[in-house]
């Protein structure tokens, strides 16, 4: 084995320029794949992370069917007690209950129809970044306080400032009229105009009072930073809930299937391109493998005549290809990881990104993902393709007859 | 001298096929590369076109006219007189194929059971039919029969959410021109099934006459959407309209739907980057192959030079060999790409990614769109960069010293 390895190593450097060029092609491919895959996965992490953080949470407990058909009557009874029960039994801290309704919101001058969300004053900031984005005024003082917090865009449209009163007019859980007059105590500004216009928040007990909820609510939101463990948290929550046939626990991708599917679509298109790219690189280097065998026909003939088995020569050729590929991949991985580490540290921004970031509620720079999967899946693909490519010249050796081979120049 | 060139060309052609296997392998790389470039460009162009078409069709049109302030604060206060003569003159521009006046305000639609915030649009049935998706998306009932039609048209999803149906009544509430709450009952006369859920749940349509009456608008409207004969003339028409209508806010689609514009720009940019990456992947292979072809003919080149052939001719010969290789590869690549685009017919079905498409503003089938410009760019990238990189092996061949070269084996 030692001798075969040495032989392969030396054969590789018989034509240093050719070997170097081939290695460049492979290393280039590896760098490119590591960078693109890392960036792609990093972007997905960022999209999921910001979506989960800003409002939606990682998991939500809802009434069965509420997700597709959010009616005020598909509610969870005794929501505050249930929320406390889940908190106690799972040991998870970032859990908060919400109730959702809909109302015509009027200021002195304007009227807008928006969603109204009842939130737990003490817990909402653990599951959503919105309370922290209150730029004017403050968040709620108590669960039963008569207060309302609205988005900056809506405040502008309603022409209200802190302290102004808003009149809410909607329909309660039993179909009766729900009405309230509440002063604005806080204005949040997330940077996303649509979000800032889409809802107003009021304390949950106030909500239950106004909308005649009788202790009901609509969702229990659970937030954890590590969204890859969503399934694990989900099973914990299900256990803590006990037998509640009419309730479901939904993970972020079920709550927002569009986001997951958009990511899947983008990832599939990405892999199509990577495979095509690696195929092109493979054809590019197949010639090197092929030539290095063909130009040595005479030599192989002699080896065969000396008693070498075609299998052994084939193994030698394969070994050469393998050493070359692994060596090049090692260089490629080193460079690729270095590039990704740099951008992981400093963040990457490109043109148009800031606008896009605002619309989708994202930070303005991407960090590539630095996981084993992100770094090694690209090089693994290259290794698989080049191994197949190396197989062909190695197989050809079986066709050689020593006498004829030796006569060749 | 002319004969010299013919000789060089003939030599280049024959040399190319001295080692048919090697040439075939590298041709595969070029064909695959050209195919990948063209198909990806067609895919990106298809998506881009689709986003554009969807944006235009989704009530945006090519150009819109509003009262200043409306877009920041889309309420009834910012309406303008659609019967004014300057506006009529401006809208008689020969580039304008169709324009449609609309009342567009936030409102609430309530059934007996549920209520929902929507954008209420008062439309002129005759002009709107040629303007947006609405007319062709009606799946139950019918479109408005007159400009004063008393009915309402809503989306399928909204009807489900409101638990209402064709023929039933809903109440629409909004703020009228005197800042009073206006509410009126409407019978559902039509139900539309749009491509995107957001369209189905976000809008309710009534006739322009009914809207003006309900809101006390007289001759005023919120917006005029304009469709042009040729979208390429958007900017020029925009400038003319702006000059004629200094008191109004005239904007092109890319200022109204910035996300669509952003997607387009991103794809344009990434297609070119993709071309370069693909070229780099096959570039290594091309150089390596030509270099090999040069080195195995060292003796021959030496002999040529010794016989009096100028180094320039040798350079030309190798270069021509590369050119022939590239042209053959490109020709086949273009053909295969064209065939595969033909084979996909209407496009590729990506409906598996349903809601993700909506976020990305795409439809369920993405068409491949081949344009002459994209073909030209892909081919130019390969040809120009290919010839540039092949200068290196050609130059190496021309630089050989005859005395040394001849004595080499």
Image (tube, coloured by chain):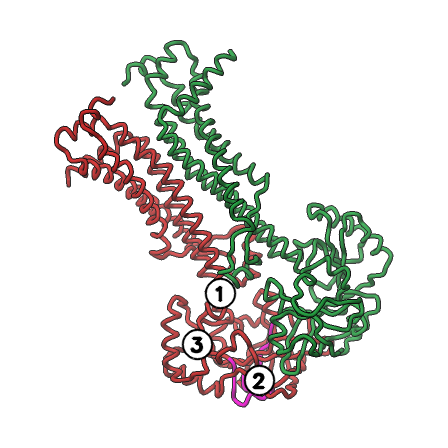
Chain colours: A red, B green
Q: CA distance from mark 3 to mark 2?
A: 23 Å
Q: Residue furthest left?
A: A307
Tag in front: 1 or 3? 3
Which residue position holds label 1?
Answer: A50
- Residue A387 position within the rendered picture, expressed as x and y whole percent measured from the top left: 29, 43
Quadrant hosting residue B189: bottom right
**Same chain for marks 2 and 1?**
yes
Asked which secondary structure carries label 2, the reply is helix
* Residue at mark 2: chain: A
**Residues at marks 3 and 2 touching, judged by CB atoms closer than 8 Å:** no
* Of B356 and B333, the residue lying toward us: B333
Count of picture labels: 3
A132, A56: nearer the viewer? A56
Q: Earlier in the sequence, mark 3 or mark 2?
A: 2
Q: Dot 3 falls on which chain?
A: A
Residue that numbered label 2 is attached to: A207
Q: Find out whether the residues at labels 1 and 3 contact each other: C-beta distance under 8 Å.
A: no
Residue A202 magenta-drawn? yes
Q: Is residue A332 magenta?
A: no
- Cα–Cα span, label 2 and label 1: 27 Å
In the rendered image of this protein, does residue A274 appear above or below residue A295? below
Q: CA distance from mark 1 to mark 3?
A: 20 Å
SS of the residue under disc 3: strand
- The residue carrying pointer 3 sits among few (fewer than 14), some (14 to 19) or many (20 or more) residues within 10 Å by Cα, namely many
Q: Image point 38% across, 13% down: which residue?
A: B304
User: In the rendered image, which quarter is residue A177 located in?
Assistant: bottom right
**A117 vs B222: above or below:** below
Q: Mark 3 highlights which residue? A: A249
**Residue A320 seen by the camera:** yes
The residue range painted magenta reads: A198-218
The answer, for residue A152, to whether it is visible in the render is no
């Amino acid at each position: 084995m030692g001798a075969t390895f040495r032989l392969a190593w030396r054969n590789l450097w018989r034509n240093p320029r050719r070997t170097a060029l081939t290695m460049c092609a492979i290393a280039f491919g590896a760098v490119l794949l590591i960078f693109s895959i890392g960036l792609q996965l990093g972007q997905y992490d960022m999209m999921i992370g910001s979506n989960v953080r800003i409002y939606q949470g990682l998991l939500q407990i809802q009434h069965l069917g509420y997700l597709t058909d959010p009616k005020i009557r598909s509610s969870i009874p005794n929501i505050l007690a249930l929320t406390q029960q889940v908190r106690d039994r799972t040991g998870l801290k970032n859990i908060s209950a919400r109730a959702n309704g809909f109302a015509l919101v009027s200021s002195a001058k304007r009227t807008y129809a928006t969603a109204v969300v009842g939130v737990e004053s003490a817990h909402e900031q653990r599951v959503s970044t919105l309370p922290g984005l209150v730029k004017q005024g403050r968040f709620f003082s108590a669960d039963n306080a008569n207060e309302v917090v609205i988005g900056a865009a809506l405040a502008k449209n309603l022409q209200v400032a802190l302290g102004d009163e808003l009149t809410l007019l909607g329909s309660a859980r039993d179909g009766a009229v729900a009405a309230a007059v509440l002063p604005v105590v806080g204005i949040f500004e997330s940077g996303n105009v649509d979000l800032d216009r889409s809802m107003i928040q009021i304390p949950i007990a106030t909500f239950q009072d106004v909308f005649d909820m009788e202790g009901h609510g609509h969702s229990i939101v659970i937030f954890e930073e590590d969204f890859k463990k969503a399934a694990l948290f989900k099973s914990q929550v299900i256990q803590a809930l006990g037998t509640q046939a009419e309730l479901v626990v939904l993970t972020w991708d079920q709550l927002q299937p569009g986001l997951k599917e958009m990511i899947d679509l983008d990832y599939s298109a990405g892999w199509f391109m990577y495979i095509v790219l690696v195929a092109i690189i493979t054809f590019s280097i197949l010639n090197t493998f092929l030539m290095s065998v063909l130009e040595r026909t005479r030599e192989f003939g002699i080896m065969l005549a000396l008693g070498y088995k075609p299998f052994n020569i084939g193994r030698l050729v394969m070994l050469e290809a393998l050493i070359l590929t692994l060596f090049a991949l090692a260089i490629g991985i080193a460079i690729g990881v270095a590039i990704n580490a740099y951008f992981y540290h400093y963040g990457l921004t490109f043109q148009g990104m800031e606008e896009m970031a605002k619309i989708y509620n994202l930070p303005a720079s991407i960090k590539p993902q630095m996981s084993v999967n992100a770094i090694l899946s690209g090089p693994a693909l290259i290794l698989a393709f080049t191994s197949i490519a190396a197989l062909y010249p190695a197989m050809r050796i079986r066709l050689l007859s020593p006498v004829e081979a030796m006569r060749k120049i | 001298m002319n004969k010299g060139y013919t000789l060089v060309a003939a030599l280049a052609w024959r040399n190319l096929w001295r080692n048919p296997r090697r040439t075939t392998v590298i041709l595969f790389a070029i064909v695959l590369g050209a195919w990948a470039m063209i198909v990806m460009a067609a895919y990106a162009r298809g998506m881009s076109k689709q986003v554009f078409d969807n944006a235009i069709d989704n009530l945006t049109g090519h150009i819109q006219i509003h009262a200043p302030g409306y877009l920041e604060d889309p309420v009834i206060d910012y309406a303008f007189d659609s019967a004014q003569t300057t506006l009529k003159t401006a809208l008689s521009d020969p580039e304008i194929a169709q324009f449609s006046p609309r009342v567009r305000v936030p409102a609430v639609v309530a059934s007996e059971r549920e209520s929902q915030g929507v954008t209420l649009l008062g439309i002129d049935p005759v002009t709107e039919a040629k303007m947006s998706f609405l007319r062709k998306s009606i799946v139950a009932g019918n479109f408005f029969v007159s400009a004063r039609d008393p009915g309402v048209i809503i989306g399928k999803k909204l009807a489900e959410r409101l638990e209402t149906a064709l023929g039933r009544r809903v109440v629409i509430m909004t703020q009228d021109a005197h800042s009073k709450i206006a509410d009126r009952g409407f019978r559902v006369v039509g139900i539309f099934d749009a491509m995107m859920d957001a369209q189905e749940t976000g809008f309710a349509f009534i006739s322009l006459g009914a809207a003006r009456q309900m809101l006390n608008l007289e001759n005023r409207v919120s917006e005029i959407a304009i469709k042009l004969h040729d979208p390429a003339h958007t900017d020029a028409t925009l400038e003319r309209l702006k000059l004629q209508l200094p008191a109004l806010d005239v904007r092109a689609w890319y200022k109204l739907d910035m996300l669509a514009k952003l997607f387009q720009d991103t794809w344009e940019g990434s297609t070119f980057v993709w071309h370069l990456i693909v070229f780099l992947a096959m570039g290594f292979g091309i150089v390596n192959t030509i270099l090999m072809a040069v080195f195995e003919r060292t003796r021959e080149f030496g002999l040529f030079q010794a016989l009096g052939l100028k180094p320039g001719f040798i350079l030309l010969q190798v270069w021509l060999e590369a050119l022939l290789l590239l042209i053959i590869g490109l020709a086949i690549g273009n053909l295969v790409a064209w065939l595969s685009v033909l084979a996909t017919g209407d496009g590729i079905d990506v409906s598996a990614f349903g809601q993700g498409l909506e976020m990305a503003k795409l439809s369920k089938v993405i068409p491949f769109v081949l344009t002459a410009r994209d073909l030209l760019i892909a081919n130019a990238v390969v040809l120009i960069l290919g010839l540039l990189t092949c200068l290196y092996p050609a130059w190496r061949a021309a630089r050989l010293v005859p005395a040394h070269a001849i004595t080499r084996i």
